[in-house]
Image: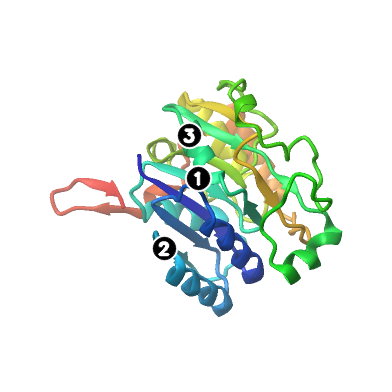
Amino acid sequence: MTSALLISTYNWPEALELILKTVLIQSKLPDVVLIADDGSDQRTKVIIEDFKAQSAVLVKHLWHPDQGFRKSSILNKAIADCSVDYIIQIDGDCLLHPKFVKDHLNAAKNGVFLAGSRINIKDGYRTELFDHQNVIFPFGFRGLRNKTRRIYWPFLGYFYRPKNIFSKKFRGCNTSFWRNDFIAVNGYNEAFEGWGREDSDLAYRLLHLGCAMQRLKYRGLLYHIPHRNLSKDRLEINDDIEQKTIAEKIIWATKGLDQYVIKASDGTSKII
């Protein structure tokens, strides 16, 4: 099974630099690191080029111009540009436990997508985090919220079984899925612009396809860096799109991954 770690980012190179430090200390590396860049400036490119020089695996930087929050679009483009079997997805404000990638890969099952949780770093520790470039968080570290979520005990996680219902605990900042399942639902729905609901809409469509969702508890730990809230001015519109997906049990995103299909001269076509 080949795998990719997919990281979405936008104009926060300081956070991306810390995230990439946590990639370098993974006990098991993915085959590819995909950086889905929603229009960042040159500072982000510098961080990525430096990481490429240190990385033992292939690094791909997918970028498009800054035309507002178009996370769904850049994620589709990034996944279209790789050919791995399995995708592990995080956001550009999340740091990885050293066994994060290994935990996702160990828990991967056919017909199942994973829903991990996040541990929030307290606001008051943000400056310290960047000043000291600390990416290891022992259990007793006082800068973390969510006390039960920080427990690392993979054995307990095996008691959580796949279910064919949506969990409100689902977060797109810590999820993984089979690329073929992602293709089967036509990826992210690019009708979602602005913050909100693009991730849960994908989860609902995977469930409608027949996949099951499994909580990734006590493993696959991820630490969320505090930041200002993004604009929610399109949230009502995005809510309506998601509610239509739920009510009509929609599987296929009308405006999705198939925009990035390569058509061959013999008339056949394939996702990149």
Q: Nearer the viewer, residue 251 or 90?
A: 90
Pick whichever of labels 1 and 3 is earlier in the sequence: 1
- Circle 2 packing at 10 Å, graded few (<14), some (14-19), many (20+), is some
Q: Position of residue 61 (x, y in %)?
A: 45, 65
The answer to whether marks 1 and 2 mark residues whose Cβ atoms lie closer than 8 Å is no
Q: Residue at x 45, y 51 (%)?
A: 29
Q: Is residue 22 left or right of residue 51?
A: right
The answer to whether marks 1 and 3 mark residues whose Cβ atoms lie closer than 8 Å is no
The circle on residue 88 is 1
The answer to whether marks 2 and 3 mark residues whose Cβ atoms lie closer than 8 Å is no
The residue singled out by tag 3 in the image is 106
Q: CA distance from mark 1 to mark 2?
A: 15 Å
Is residue 65 placed above or below 23 in the rendered structure?
Answer: below
Q: Give amino acid for label 2.
A: Lys
Q: CA distance from mark 1 to mark 3?
A: 12 Å
Image-quadrant location for residue 260: bottom left
Residue 68 visible, this orientation: no
The residue singled out by tag 2 in the image is 60
